[in-house]
Image: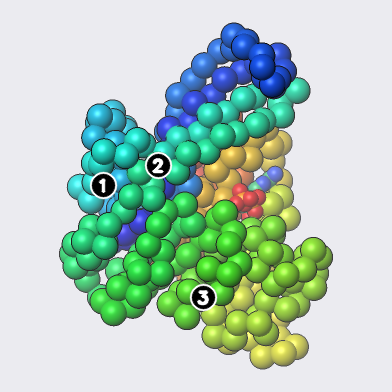
Amino acid sequence: TIYNVGSINLDHLYQLAHFVRPGETMSSDSYQCLLGGKGANQSVALAKAGADVKHVGAIHHSDQAILDQLEALGVDTGLISRTEVPTGHAIIQLTRAAENSIILYQGANHALTEEQVDQALSQANAGDWVLLQNETNLIEYTMRKAQQNKLKVAFNPAPMDAELTKKVLGFVDLLIVNEVEAMDLIGTTDIDSTTAALPNAYPGLAVLMTLGKEGVRYFDGDLRPGTESLFVKAFSVEAVDTTAAGDTFIGFCLSSLMKGEDMVQAITRACAASAICVTRLGAASAIPTQQEVSEFLAK
Ligand code: ADP
């Protein structure tokens, strides 16, 4: 079982001719309300990949539809609390030139309580995983509890907060970052020096670094200077929307690892899943099923 302690957002998407200007009122061409948030996206990816996933989070008590949608996709919602605080959401303006401008409201995603975390993790068995992103409160508290309960911790520090991340790395078994997050963590603006510095900066830490259309690099935490890290090339596809590529990768990779696949198999399958994801518009709805991934790999 994997306990994903993460955000749940409603993404309100408005298509407009141009961004609303100061003082202007304008009608949108279209409106869609979609389930989002890195936490929810990763739970959906885990469920679609066949993992037993329990989402730990919070929403406003009036938003039952979110729970129904997550359950329909295979996510256990029994540990999601209902609060007085409004559900986290994003107001997204999307222009015809495909530029976006986003207002984010954290809302209930920052209303997790210690009691809720304690109760959730007390159900877990030694060896179960806890997954966190950086869109909820109580990150350090949750990791400390997870370690006390002998659970494995995977951390995707997105959006990156380098100070917090460095502080909690001692609790982390597997760190998953994209290029920008890795550079922010190391404090450089150059990916090659980041790749060189990362294994030495945190010896003993296993790191998966996703490199967009290039692929994925993995450091197992025991690399000695001069030894090679693992690199898996991405699949070549026509990308139309890279939203949720990272979330898809994380869900499929962790699901494979939990099934006992080795790291190369897990990364390869996750690269296939995220390659499919980038060929489709949308977030949660763009995440493929296990069967679609198997068919893609068989081609
Ligand atoms: P994030 O979405 O967090 O920024 P990345 O952009 O690194 O993460 O993408 C995660 C993974 O998705 C990559 O490691 C790769 O396997 C896959 N991916 C992303 N963009 C593409 C692309 N254009 N073509 C093929 N695969 C892609």
Label 2 within 8 A of ligand 1 by Cβ: no
Expressed as whole percent of the image width and height from the top left, the position of residue 280 reads 58, 32
Residue at figure coordinates x 45%, y 35% from the top left: 89
Q: If the image is split into quadrants, where does the C terminus sit?
A: top right
Residue 141 figure quarter: bottom left
- Amino acid on which disc 2 is placed: Gly
Residue at figure coordinates x 35%, y 43% from the top left: 108
For mark 2, does the 10 Å Cα neighbourhood hold few (<14), some (14 to 19), or many (20 or more) residues?
Answer: many
Front position among marks 1 and 2: 2
Q: Pick whichever, 188 or 210, lies toward us.
A: 188
For mark 1, does the 10 Å Cα neighbourhood hold few (<14), some (14 to 19), or many (20 or more) residues?
Answer: many
Nearer-N-terminus badge (1/3): 1
Mark number displayed over residue 80 = 1
Expressed as whole percent of the image width and height from the top left, the position of residue 8 reads 39, 42
Q: Is any part of residue 22 visible from this angle?
A: yes
- Amino acid on which disc 1 is placed: Ile
- State the separation of the CA atoms marked 1 and 2: 14 Å
Residue at figure coordinates x 48%, y 31% from the top left: 11
Mark 2: secondary structure: helix
Residue picked out by circle 3? 167
Residue 161 falls left or right of residue 111: right
Mark 3: secondary structure: helix
Expressed as whole percent of the image width and height from the top left, the position of residue 257 reads 43, 66
- State the separation of the CA atoms marked 1 and 3: 27 Å
Residue 297 falls left or right of residue 136: right
Mark number displayed over residue 107 = 2
Residue 1 figure quarter: bottom left
Residue 217 falls left or right of residue 76: right
